Amino acid sequence: MRKSKSPKKHDKDRDKEKRKAKHDPNTHPLNLPPDQLRQLFTAQMARQEAEANRSSMSMDRDTPEASEQNFVNGSSPPVTPSKEAPGAFPEHPSDHSTNGTSNASDERSPTPPPHRVTPHKVDPEACKAAGNKFFKAKDYDRAIAEYTKAVDAEPSNPTYLSNRAAAYISANKYSQALGDSLQASRLDPKNDKILHRLARIYTSLGRPQDALDTYAKIPNASTTDTAAACKVLSSIEVAENQINSEEGNGNMALWSIDQAKQTLGAGTPTPRRWQILRAKANLKIGSANALGEVQAIAQSLMRENPMDAEAIVLAGRAFYLKDDKPRQGKSDYERAEDYFRQGLNLDPDNTDARNSLRTMKKLDRARTSANEMFKRGKYSDAVVAYTESLTIDPSNKVTNAKLLGNRALARIKIKEFDEARSDCDLALKLDPTYSKAKRTRAKATGESGDWEQAVKDLKAMAEENPSDAELNKELRNAELELKKSKRKDYYKILGIDKDAGDKDIERAYKRKAAVLHPDKTMGDKKKEEEFKDCLEAKETLLDPQKRHMYDSGADLMEPGMGGMGGGFPGGMGGMGGFGGGGVQIDPEMLFNMMNGMGGGGSGAGGGGGFRFAGGGGPPRGGFSPFG
């Protein structure tokens, strides 16, 4: 029979009822403060010990009073263990239970809930104050962290977003700052401070027009406020005008872009549009270094976006203007065509790709046709063809420099030496690195009669490029021509061209003799000497072997050049070694001298003919006429 509660027990019940209002019945004991948890544990141990003592006297001791002893300090009302009471301790195991088994009381005891932390409410104003403190201390990362807590607590508060944007700016994170400022301006569109900050962010990101549009929303925005954005916008407009104008200057465009870049925020990448402009400015410059920068910009853009048709076309134009022909692999024109076609596949309406491909094909056909005329000896026609080719694409400086160099060579063939030198000067103006134009100019200078200046020019080039075998050979040829120019000029004496035939020589001699013959110039020593020169010229030029030796300069080689057999013209046998001083003649030059002379064996005093150690003549290389 259950005993009634004593007055003392009723007092305890009233105390627990009072404490019930202060304690959440769903709170797990593990969530209690340490002191209460310690007291609860002590009371639990005392309860278990008391129940163990009573169990020997009575088996029915599980009363509400006993259960109430489980909680102290009025933290919780008594709770009957059940699955519906997640905050209660399970009852102590029954005497009849065993390890690994369960009974009815076990089924009534719920599993303790997981540890649960009561969410702590964030005070956004406190976070903002902490963020301001870190911002003033220039600890921007921690300031951003505090402002982020405030934003998370109140996402619709524009002040918190604006403050975090300021911290992002100071941390050089302009893209994140832009996002916060845009959101803040949407929440508070009339806030001048937010709009000022947004405009400055646009300027730092290289978006001057957006910055000016934002300033337009601020009633009292001053010229000082808008100065930076106006400067950027003006610089970019100048660059575009320089690029798009035929008379524009690529270097001026680059300078303007650099001026605009000075306003970018630290660590801010160059806007894609500015990179495109920089590449186009370098295309306008057209030098080897400038074209290399174009390729670097195009490759960088293609790495970011392999489908960027505009960048692909830029790469194609760089190869087209570079116009190099490596010994192996594709030429630059072939590689340019690949890029242009790739750009058209990605963007069939890309006019730059279509026009560049069409122009390149037209220029290549015209240049090939002009070169073929030169090879066939149609030099006057070649000059006309090169001139027409130069009108196809004035922007292609490298190719046009080569066309001018080739036209100069054709003009040398038709004895237009002054025009040839002018072409070389124009070629070097277009491409200062085009060394062949310097060599062609020296050749034109020499052919015009000024071999002394030609030798000076070639020597200067040889000093800069001592390992250039072709250049050294041209220098030796020029030195020989210089020696030839200082001897008697038989053609000039007779007043005939160097390609004059025997009949022309006979007629020229008769005309001179009719005036200078001693019978008609009795006592005039000067006239007598002139007549002797005419006779000497006729005898030399009418003798095929003597004329060839005279034209080739072989008659200028001194006796000390060793191994010359009987010397000139008595014999050519045994041209063993060429020691000694005099003009240095390389084997190819000698081969050219002996060409057409029957190998030196016929009519030259005998000998075994002219042979090289390799069993034949040297390769017939020489100056390549085409750039």
Image (cartoon, rainbow, N blue to C red):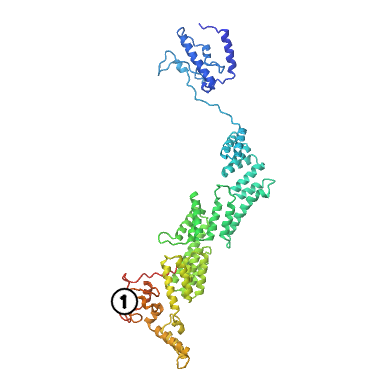
In the rendered view, would you say 320 is above or below 87? below
Q: Is residue 595 visible?
A: no
Q: Secondary structure at mark 1?
A: loop
The quarter of the displayed image where residue 625 is located: bottom left
Identity of the residue drawn at 45% across and 78% down: 485
**Is 543 or 301 nearer to us in this picture?**
543
Q: Amino acid at mark 1?
A: Gly
**Is 104 or 202 nearer to us in this picture?**
202
Identity of the residue drawn at 67% across and 45% down: 218
Identity of the residue drawn at 52% across and 26% down: 116
| Side of 214 relative to 578 (left or right) | right
Point out residue 510 in the picture as x, y percentages from the top left corner: 44, 89
State the residue lying farthest toward the top. 1
Point out residue 158 in the picture as x, y percentages from the top left corner: 63, 38
Q: Is residue 112 visible?
A: yes
Question: Which residue, given by chain and number where applicable, does mark 1 sit on?
Answer: 574
| Side of 627 relative to 202 (left or right) | left
In the rendered view, would you say 224 is above or below 87? below
**Is 24 or 465 nearer to us in this picture?**
465
User: Tag count in the figure?
Assistant: 1
**Is 388 or 52 nearer to us in this picture?**
52
Point out residue 598 in the picture as x, y percentages from the top left corner: 33, 78
Crowding at mark 1 (Cα within 10 Å: few <14, some 14-19, many 20+): some
In the rendered view, would you say 453 is above or below 210? below
Point out residue 86 in the picture as x, y percentages from the top left corner: 51, 21
State the residue lying farthest toward the right. 220
In the rendered view, would you say 118 is above or below 346? above
